[in-house]
Image: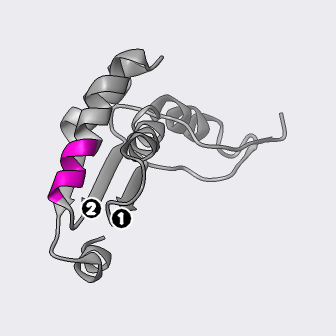
Amino acid sequence: VDKITGPGNIFVTVAKKQVFGQVGIDMIAGPSELTVICDGQTDPDWVAMDLFSQAEHDEQAQSILISPDIDYLDKVQASIDRMLPTMERKDIITESLANRGIFIAVDDLQQAAAAR
C-alpha cells in the first residue's frame, strides 16, 4: 500500500494515525458535518436523504438544516421519520441525528447564510 485516502468514521481516522509515516495518507479527519440551507422549495425527501448521507458516516457526524420556513422544517422531519426505518445504516443515522443533528429556524436566507 502506497497511500490511504478517502473519508471514513472514527475507525478509519484511528487506522490512518496508526500507519502515518509508513504509508502516505490524505489527512487525519475528525467527525464530519454538513449544513443545508434551504428556502423550503426543495422536496423534503431529498433534504432528508442529504442529512442521512452525512449522518450515516458515524455517530459523531453532524447534520444541520437551516431554513426560514418552519413548516418546511416539520416536513423534513416527517420525511426523516418515514424514511429512516428503511435505511441500511439506520442505527448509526439515528444516533447521529439524535445527538448531533439540528434544525435551525431563521428569519430569512440572509440570516441563514450568516448562521452557518
Please report the residue visible at 52 percent of the width from the left and 39 percent of the height from the top.
13
Q: Amino acid at mark 2?
A: Ile
Q: Is residue 43 left or right of residue 103?
A: right
In the rendered structure, does residue 74 fall within the stretch colored magenta? yes
Residue at 58% from the left image edge and 35% from the top image edge? 18
Predominant secondary structure, magenta span: helix
**How far from the left and from the top, in percent, is residue 70?**
15, 57
Q: Secondary structure at mark 1?
A: strand
Above or below, 98 against 43 in this view is above
Decide: marks 1, 2 in contact (CB < 8 A)? yes
Whether 33 is drawn above or below 39: the answer is above
Q: Which residue is most to the right?
A: 2
| Stretch of the chain drawn in magenta | 70-75
Nearer to the camera, 61 or 83: 83
C-alpha separation, residue under disc 1 versus residue under disc 2? 5 Å
Secondary element at tag 2: strand
Residue neighbourhood size for the residue with mark 1, other residues' Cα within 10 Å, grouped as few (<14), some (14–19), many (≥20)? some
Disc sitting over residue 4 in the figure:
none
- Where in the figure is residue 17, as x and y percent of width and height? 56, 40
Q: How is the image coloured?
A: one colour
**Residue 42 seen in render:** yes
Mark 2 nearby-residue class (10 Å; few <14, some 14–19, many ≥20) = many
Q: Amino acid at mark 1?
A: Ile
Per the image, the residue denoted by label 1 is 37
Residue 69 sits in quarter: bottom left
Q: Which mark is residue 66?
A: 2
In the picture, which quadrant includes the C terminus?
A: bottom left
Tell me the quarter of the picture where residue 16 sits: top right
